[in-house]
Image: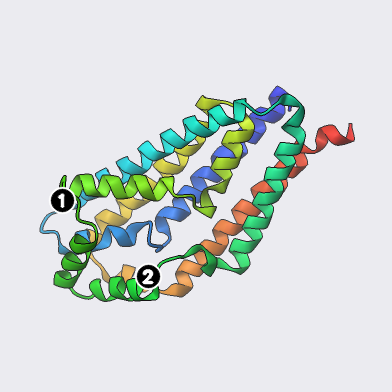
Amino acid sequence: MDSATTTMTFIVALQASIVLGLLHGISPCGHSWPMLAPFCITTKNMRKCINVWFFFCLGTTVACLVLGVIFGMLGSFIPPSWDIYFGVGTACILVVLGVVVIFKPHWLHFEDEEEEEALKKSLDSTEQALQFTTNKRRFKHGIYWGMFSIGFINMIIPCPTAAVMYTYALVAKSVPVGTTIFLAYALATSLVLLIITYSLGKATLFFKKLGQEKYEVLITRISGVFIAGFGVYMIIVESKPLFQ
């Protein structure tokens, strides 16, 4: 790709990462605000809520930086002669993945039904919420570093909604670019989680409604549209040399 095309693709990828990060923060999946909800509901002051949010998002951000460096470096090993085919191939995967997410959003969730039910019940009682969360997420270095570990691990484990960052970091063949893309996703997610954490510390009724499955499915499908759309854009950009 020429420099102008590369810059335009980077801008689109950056915007897609920010939007997906915002959607990820809003989505009531097991890797987002429901993990923070029990702490926010049971806390006696907002400072503890913010501390829990900070360490969780710090773990997510550190993981994104690590992934950006790794995938940016891996991309540099791809031979230049493979660029067109690799770019088109990964873009096609994004389109397929986006379509799957749109029509089969349930495939993204691997939590056991019993675990999900336990979490929903825990949100109805501050005592149960605290007990459920601390028993399941107890770490020897304390709850804050435990939340850091959870945030880090959740981001390291591959997630379909993060496919845009993985793909573009490889295609860009640049550590700074790959890191920027992942960091934008992490910061967007952190911003939404901060707003939700603060709001959740004040009131919980709205988020009980938001936790309904239909809202999660809707947000997941919206993410799928962005993933597929970016995949189509990449196919158009990456395949141009084939027709010249």
Front one among 73 and 95: 73
Q: Amino acid at mark 2?
A: Gly
- Direction right: furthest residue: 244
Residue 6 position within the rendered picture, expressed as x and y whole percent measured from the top left? 67, 29
Quarter holding the C terminus?
top right
Above or below: residue 21 compared with residue 68: below
Residue 40 position within the rendered picture, expressed as x and y whole percent measured from the top left? 21, 59
Residue at left 46%, top 70%?
215
Residue 191 is at least partly visible in this image: no
Residue 218 position within the rendered picture, expressed as x and y whole percent measured from the top left? 52, 67
What's the CA distance linking mark 2 and mark 1?
23 Å
Relative to 225, 42 lies left or right: left
Secondary element under disc 2, as helix, strand or loop, is loop
Give the class, few, some or many, for how many residues have Cα within 10 Å of label 1's Cα (few <14, many ≥20): some
Q: Amino acid at mark 1?
A: Lys
Give the class, few, some or many, for how many residues have Cα within 10 Å of label 2's Cα (few <14, many ≥20): some
- Direction top: furthest residue: 3
Q: Quadrant of residue 79?
A: top right
Secondary element under disc 1, as helix, strand or loop, is helix
In the rendered image, which residue does mark 1 sit on? 48
Above or below: residue 213 compared with residue 96: below
In the rendered image, which residue does mark 2 sit on? 211
Residue at left 67%, top 50%?
93
